[in-house]
Image (cartoon, grey):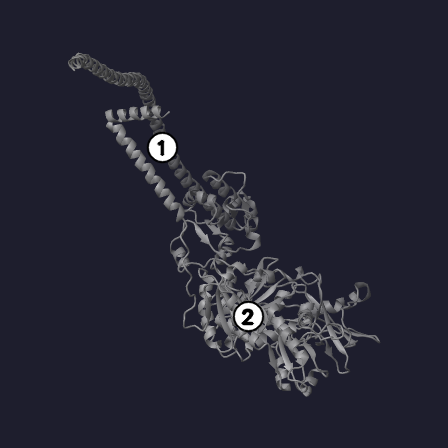
Amino acid sequence: MLRRVRQSLRQVLLLMARRPDLLGGAVVLSVLLVLALVLTCSRAKDVVAAARPPVRFFSAEAPIVDLYMGQLDQVERLRSVAEVSLIFFYAPWCAHSMAARQEVQQVAKKLAKQVQFVAVNCWYSLGKCRRQNRFYHYPIIQLFYRRFGPIEYKGPVVALYVESFILRVITPLTYLPSRATLEEFLSNHEPRVVGFFQFNSSPQPPGYITYLSSALQALKRDFRGVVRFGVVTNKQVAEAIALKEDESVYLHRILNSSLIFPRLERNFTSEGICSWVFENHQTVLKWLQPPGTKSRLLEQELTKGPALLLFLPHNPLGSKPDPILHQIADIAVRYHSCEINDHSGSDGRSSFLCCQSVLLPESRTSVCEVCLRSSGQSRSSSSVRCSFPSTAQGGDVWRPHLRHCCLYRLPAPVATDSSSSVDCSNLLSSYSPFSQYSACCRPVEPQLNESQAKEGPDMQRLMPPPLSVPPSSVTQQTGDGITGLRCQTNRTLRFYLLDVALNWPLAVRLGATGNSTAALHQEAGDPGDGSSHRSFAAIVNLKDEVHYVLHRSPAATLTESLEAFIRNFSAPYSLLQRHLVGEEDRKGGEEEARRHRPLITELTTSSFLPSVMDLQKDVLLIYYTQWCGFCSILNHIIIHLARLLQENSTITVARVNVARNDLPWEFMVDHVPSILLFPRYRKHLSVKFPDDLPITLPNLLHFVLQHSGSAHDADKPVASSVKADGSGAAAVLRAEFLALQREVQTLHSARERLSQQLAQLWRDNRRLTFDSLILESQNTELQRERQSLEEQHQEKSRLLGKAVRRLQELADTSENLLNENTLLRILLRALRDRTEEVEEEEEEVEEEEIMEPEQKRSHMAS
């Protein structure tokens, strides 16, 4: 075996000695293979770069313990030595964490002596916080009050709000030493809880710690602190709210009677008190505090029903009560006060005013309202229902009085006070031992907001007539018109407050601008320039996909404007107009349009109705959006059509972007692109371009000429418009002739343009035909050349194959010859060696033969 290997190695070495290029190539390949293996193995170890070590997130000057290595075990040690601790979990790469860093530092500098601030890097992979917690967003703020917690803060990470939240955790209970402070504490619109504990027997009564824990439980359930907790230690002060027993808890409610915690029915524990408070508390105003990140807080509230959104300036740390907020809270309380609709008479009995809209066939301009005042009901009755006599019993009795009231009544002077009494022109009375009724009739006048009042008679002309209002029976109060309105309508409103500084982009999306912003702070003595105090109010009805904006004039007070706004929304025949949000018109666009008529008019929300409803023009309207690809393909067709119709001043080509401009429901379309034609003098007979017809220039032109107002007027008989006198008939005929002449000229010019375009198209087609013939001939020549080249390629390939085979044979022959030559050399070498050995043997034999006689001679001589 070794012998064969040696022979093979000798052969290889001999071949390499004869062909040095083969030796060099083998050496180069070996070196490259070794280098590739070395580089691959070295990179496999360091493919992923090591993470950089974490660094401090907060500055060293800030009074915050920054555990940037994720040492969660040190958090427990720091919490144990502090009464109140704030834990800030962050990720160094998170933009929200970076934005909150400055706010938390600002709060820490103010409250460092009262609160222990700790920041934990919960993103470091080797830290204990990352291994034990699974946070899905950053930052996360948690507060601990001694051993109670965590209380998570989910509001906006703004210094004022964070500081307000920390102060509420530090002082969860408000001490009420006197009746004045108790009355001031209970006068707020927010729910209030008062606990009575006597500190005579011991420093801390056993129920006080439970009550304190219940206040912290309330903050844990609702971080906004809607429910405030107070504590009374004086027995005389507690008797003001009927608290006589020690360790009693009192829940103050604005709308219904207040409650005392039932210790016989519920366990006196922190969870029990907190659950009882949240089950029975009442709120009329709710603050919405979106966290500033992706959240469904606003959607969850708007899906509950119509909402009144009030954007007001808010200072969470403000100690003085806001007069504007106080007025809004008063309106909300009266709106929800369903049991305050009664008006006591002189005899101590209450009276109720129930009204019903009655439609009279004789009247077509107004609706009469019949109001029955029911007297003699007890104030303790839980509910009062309006009961009107049926038509068979008493309906025909007051019909003449209603006719006299509504048709022949003189117009009453304008009342300066909204709470003026109802004028009774006729009185019908009947006696009953249980009730007494009196009927009054008056025309119902619509309540307009400020934006509608500015429109004047035009707006009233566009409003639906009062006869379209269905008969309704509602209970109304004889006072301000908003007290108890929540229980008188099916369109119940929810009141929400938002900080205008944090949520102004939302107000802008709803329609707030610098001019339309309600200057609510003018009554409080503010300048009202809108720079420092911007306010806005809107009603959003998510179910109907509409919202209304309050446009308040400086002459009206805040209370009057909001009450009228709420009444108009709650009325069954509401005259509020849906607010449409659209693109702002470009500055100077109208002046430019007046000087130079645009080829295609771009419509917005504000200019849509005036342009489309122009009775003197036929309007071809194209609906499109910026994301519609097919709409952009049709642009050149629309431009050609607009150029053809440019000389006709009675036809306007317009388009509207429905993705950026809200339109009235009756003008919306179900898909884009859509094309509608609004003919002049017949706007109610608008025509839609057929969906099954291709949108081409001839089809569009035929559609416009077929359905335009000029074509419709030409089809009318001349006799229908001819006057009695001959001059009038001649004038009408002349006008018709001129109109037809203009239409004919327009058609001629359009035909000439089409003829020119067709001629140009024919020339282009002919040129393209010639070019195609030339290209075909060139293609044929190229095909022939390709075939010849392929034949030559095949022939060369065949010859090359033969040459390769011959070369291969020569190489094999040469290799065989080399092998034979090597063998011959080896044999020659072996023969030489053999010959030398034979010669040496012969020489030795000859020497031996020569030596033998000499030996014999010497022997004989001896």
Question: Residue 567, percent across and down?
Answer: 63, 68
Amino acid type, mark 1: Asp
Q: Compared with residue 549, is residue 753 higher up or lower down, i.e. above or below?
A: above
Sequence-wise, which precedes: disc 2 or disc 1? 2
State how far apart marks 2 and 1 are (Cα): 80 Å
Categorize mark 1 by other alpha carbons within 10 Å: few (<14), some (14-19), many (20+): few
Count how many numbered circles sit on residues in the image. 2
Q: Is residue 653 visible?
A: yes
Residue at the farthest front position: 862
The answer to whether 556 appears left or right of 389 in the picture is: left
Kind of element beneath mark 2: strand
Q: Compared with residue 272, is residue 692 higher up or lower down, i.e. above or below?
A: above
Q: Nearer the viewer, residue 289 or 858?
A: 858
Q: Is residue 741 visible?
A: no
Report the mark closest to the observer, 2 or 1. 2
The answer to whether 425 appears left or right of 104 in the picture is: right
Amino acid type, mark 2: Leu
Give the quarter of the image for residue 408: bottom right
Q: Nearer the viewer, residue 148 or 807?
A: 807
Residue at the farthest right position: 433
Question: Residue 750, percent across and down?
Answer: 42, 40
Quadrant that contains the N terminus: top left
Question: Who's the residue at 47% across and 43% down the image?
Answer: 630
Kind of element beneath mark 1: helix
Quadrant that contains the C terminus: top left
Question: Residue 100, percent across and down?
Answer: 47, 66
Residue under numbered circle 2: 143
Categorize mark 2 by other alpha carbons within 10 Å: few (<14), some (14-19), many (20+): many
Image disc number at residue 764: 1
Q: Nearer the viewer, residue 253 or 110?
A: 110
The answer to whether 629 appears left or right of 169 in the picture is: left
Q: Compared with residue 605, is residue 815 higher up or lower down, i.e. above or below?
A: above
